[in-house]
Image (cartoon, grey):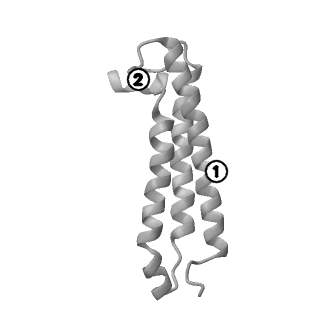
């Protein structure tokens, strides 16, 4: 099973995919729910941001697993040193975007977006 073997070694670029991707998806979802939450008094935006932070942390964990493996994770970067560099960069980016999502969710706990 190729997919299981790749996941056990980690995927070096997963943090670069899930970190910014989760932030972008959460930002779009928060904007989409803005009118709904003001009209109904239900505020899902903090929880969307916290879920996005969890997704970014999953990306960081998979990239960290690739960074620690002997092969530097699975391909596509061809060199082991390149895969380790990409994995380290991915971990940092995913952690940064997880922090951004947490900060955005924390702000949504204080400000609802319906203040005028």
Give the mark, 2 or 1, whose residue is nearer the N terminus.
2
Q: Residue at x 55, y 50 (%)?
A: 54
Query: Circle 1 — which element?
Result: helix
Indicate left or right for 89 with 75 as reference: right
Q: Is residue 68 above or below residue 107?
A: above
> Residue 88's spot in the image, x, y percent?
59, 27
Task: Identify whether 6 is placed above or below 18.
Answer: above
Instruction: Give the residue displayed 57% in from the left and 67% down from the top.
Output: 46
The foreground one among 28 and 48 is 28
Q: Residues within 10 Å of mark 1 (few under 14, many from 20)?
A: some
Given contact means CB atoms under 8 Å apart, are the residues at marks 2 and 1 in contact?
A: no
Assign a secondary structure to mark 2: helix
Q: Measured along the vertical axis of the image, is residue 110 above or below residue 73? A: below
Residue 1 appears in the rendering: no
Q: Which mark is residue 54?
A: none
Name the residue that disc number 2 marks.
6
Q: Single out the residue that lies furthest toward the front.
A: 116
Residue 93: quarter of image: top right
Task: Determine if residue 95 is in view.
Answer: yes
Closer to us: 90 or 6:
90
Question: How many numbered badges does the structure rendering display?
Answer: 2
**Badge number at residue 99:** 1
Rendering coords of residue 68 (x, y %)? 59, 20
Identity of the residue drawn at 64% across and 50% down = 99
> Percent from the top left, x then y, of residue 56?
53, 45
Q: Nearer the viewer, mark 2 or mark 1?
A: 1
Q: Residue 23 location in percent, x, y? A: 50, 53
> Callout 2: few (<14), some (14-19), or many (20+) C-alpha neighbours within 10 Å?
some
Q: Residue furthest left?
A: 1
Q: Quadrant of the N terminus?
A: top left
Give the left or right position of residue 93, taking residue 18 as reference: right
């Amino acid at each position: 099973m190729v997919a299981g073997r790749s996941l056990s070694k980690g995927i070096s670029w997963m943090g670069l995919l899930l970190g910014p991707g989760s932030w972008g998806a959460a930002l779009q979802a928060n904007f989409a729910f803005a009118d709904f939450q003001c009209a109904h008094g239900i505020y899902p935006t903090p929880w969307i941001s916290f879920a996005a932070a969890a997704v970014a942390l999953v990306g960081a964990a998979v990239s960290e697993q690739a960074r620690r493996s002997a092969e530097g994770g699975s391909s596509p970067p061809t060199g082991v040193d390149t895969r380790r560099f990409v994995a380290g960069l991915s971990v940092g980016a995913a952690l940064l975007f997880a922090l951004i999502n947490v900060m955005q969710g924390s702000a949504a706990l204080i400000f609802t977006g319906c203040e005028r």
